[in-house]
Image (cartoon, rainbow, N blue to C red):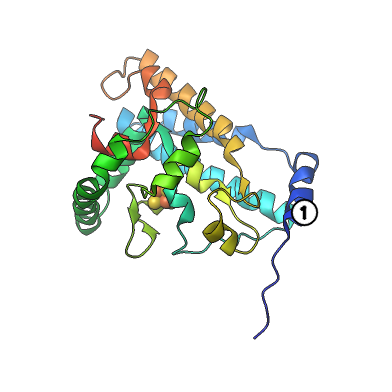
Amino acid sequence: MEKLQFLTYEEIQTKCERLSDVYEIDEEKFYRVVEKWADEKTTTEKKLLASFEELLLVVSNEITSMEEVLEMKPTCRMGCAFCCYFPIIINEMEAKLMKKAIENFSEERKEAVTSHLSRYYRKYGEKLDRMPALDTDTDDDFKSTYIKSQIPCAMLNTETNQCMAYEIRPIPCRTYMNYTDPLVCAGNEMPKETVSFEFLYEQYMGALNEFMRFLYEDGDTDFIDYPNDVYATDYLANWFKTKQV
Ligand code: SF4
């Protein structure tokens, strides 16, 4: 059987260094999403949820476009979930919107998530409580501490190693990619070869933030608590456990 050829660390670095010369992020793509939904005659929740889902897709499409320009193919595969043990941090609005999106899943899928979450917190709840409080400014080691604890993401089905909310997976996991031998993720807590496109958070949250502010100032304060919804951040697993979102 032909041996798969993977990019080397050096090749990945060289390609990524070229990115800003060969690709320009079109911020307008993000703002067009919220402008479209601002004009729709529907509820604030539906406008925000639809914008959230579409903005996540814009992020993924941007990554695909960058990969095409750089001639890189991701080697991430379904069933590979090493990065689902990373601390996934989201803000309160993202948590609210993920919950809303899950409410719209089919009954069968919703029931699967609900029963998974109750098993999850029985198994990992105490361990989760011992995780360092989120303090990315002063605790450089918090990521390593979290990964070492081997707490899976609350959305990870650990039997299949598949995400139970894949289409609405948040920015940190959506933007984390591998372009070399997937074994680097198995052998290293934080492999140096992986690439993060998390910089796209700026355009994604920029557009979502603007939309939230616009709707809030327009009087839609039932679903939105602005700006707290943007500034309150926590581990994804904590939002689904303890927070009333
Ligand atoms: S949301 Fe899904 S893809 Fe992201 S870390 Fe959790 S299980 Fe993995």
Q: Hey, what amino acid is under mark 1?
A: Glu
At 77% across and 43% down in the image, what residue appears? 17
Q: Return the residue nearer the eye: 200 or 133.
A: 133
Judge whether 212 appears above or below 52 on screen: above
What residue sits 67% from the left and 37% below the top? 25
Residue 187, percent across and down?
55, 59
* Helix, strand or loop at mark 1: helix
Q: Quadrant of residue 7?
A: bottom right
Residue 21 image-quadrant placement: top right
Residue 81, position as x, y percentages in the image: 45, 57
- For image coordinates 49% across by 46% down, the residue present is 173
Apparent side of residue 196 relative to residue 23 in the rendered image (left or right): left
Provide residue 137's location: percent of width, then percent of height: 52, 23
Q: Which residue is mark 1?
A: 10
22 horizontally vs 43: left or right: right
Quarter of the figure with residue 97: top left
Relative to 99, 197 lies left or right: right
Q: Is residue 170 above or below residue 217?
A: below
Q: Quadrant of the N terminus?
A: bottom right
Residue 164 visible, this orientation: no
In the image, what residue occupies the spot 24% across and 42% down?
Answer: 125
Residue 22 or residue 146, whichever sits in front:
146
Q: Is residue 78 visible?
A: yes
Query: Horizontal and vertical percent for residue 136?
Result: 49, 27
